[in-house]
Amino acid sequence: MFDLLIFVAIPYISIALALFVTPYRYLSGRLTWSAYSTQFLERKSLFWGSVPWHYGVVILLIGHAIGFLFPSAVQSLLSSMTRLFVMESIALGLGLLTLLGTFVLLFRRVFTGVRAVSNIADYIVLLLVLNQAITGVYMGIFARWGMEWYLHTAVPWLYSLLTFQPNVALVSGLPLAFKIHVLGAFLILAFLPFTKFVHFLFFPVGYLTEPPILYRWVKRRKA
Ligand code: HEM
C-alpha cells in the first residue's frame, strides 16, 4: 500500500499538478514567478548558503538526468571500479555541499531578519530540499553503489511510470531512505507551481542584454 502510494499515486498526482497548475500560475500571476530576493536583509550567510546549495544540487540533478537519459552509456562508464569510486566520491562531495548549503539557508531563515518576511511556503521548500540532501547523502554512504543500482531499478521504474505501466516491483525492495528520497522528489514537483520552486523554470537569458539595475539607498534627512 505504502509502495503504491509512493511509486504510483503521488508521482501521477504531482506530475498532473505540475503540468496543469504551472501554466495557470504563469498566466494569472506572472509577477509572482520568482524567488523573491532577500539579499537586502542579509547577504553574508545567503552567499554561504545559496552558492554551495545551487552548485551542489544543479550538478547532481544533471547527473540524475544523464543516468535517466543515457543508462547504457553511464553503465559502461561505471563498469570500472576505479571510475565508479571516483564518480561516487564526486557525488558524495556535491551531496555534502548541498547539505551544508541547506543548513545555512535554514539557519538564515530562522535566526536572521529574513524571518520577518518568510512564509510557510519558504519553510516547506527548505525542508523538502533538506530531506533530499539528507536521504541522498545517506544513500551515498550507506547504500552503495547508488549510481549503479539507480540504473537498474529507479531508471526502469521511471520509464514504466512515463509509459503508464508502473512497475513497482522494480523499486519496492530498495531501502527506506530511497523511498523517502523519491517521495520528497515528487512532493517538490507537486509544490512547484505553488512555491518559489517555480523559478527553476525561468532562465534569465534576457538579462544578458538588459542594462543592469542600479539600487540606491535613500537616507532621510533629519528634520
Ligand atoms: C525520482 C527522482 C529521484 C531519484 C530516483 C533519485 C535517486 C537518487 C539516488 C539513487 C541517489 C544515490 C546516489 C549515490 O549513491 O551516489 C541520489 C542521491 C542524491 N539525490 Fe536524488 N533522486 C531523485 C530526485 C532528486 C531531487 C529532486 C533532488 C534534489 C532536489 C535530489 C538530490 C540528491 C542529492 C543531494 C543526492 C546525494 C548525492 C550523494 O551524496 O551521493 N534527488 N538520488
Image (tube, grey):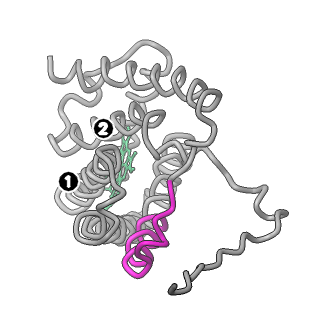
Residue 130 lies left or right of residue 151; in this view the side is left
Residue 141 lies left or right of residue 184; in this view the side is left
**114 relative to 197, above or below:** below
Which residue is at the far top? 165
Tell me the tag on residue 143.
1
**Foreground label between 2 and 1:** 2
Asked whether 24 or 9 is in front, the reply is 24
**Residue at position x 30%, y 70% from top?**
108
Which residue is at the far right? 209
* Residue 204 drawn at (x, y percent): 70, 55
Amino acid type of the residue that numbered disc 1 sits on in the rendered structure: Ala
**Residue at position x 41%, y 66% from top?**
53
The reply to whether the magenta stretch includes residue 44 is yes
Q: Quadrant of the N terminus?
A: top left
> Which secondary structure lies at badge 1?
loop
> Which secondary structure lies at badge 2?
helix
**159 relative to 121, above or below:** above
Magenta residue span: 36-55
* Residue 165 drawn at (x, y percent): 41, 12
**205 relative to 215, above or below:** above
* The quadrant where residue 213 appears: bottom right
Mark 2 CB near ligand 1 (8 Å cut): yes
Mark 1 CB near ligand 1 (8 Å cut): yes
* Residue 75 drawn at (x, y percent): 47, 49
Q: Name the residue under label 2.
A: 182
Residue 100 lies left or right of residue 197; in this view the side is left
Q: Counting other residues with Cα less than 10 Å from the Cα at mark 2, is it few (<14), some (14-19), or many (20 or more)?
A: many
Amino acid type of the residue that numbered disc 2 sits on in the rendered structure: Val
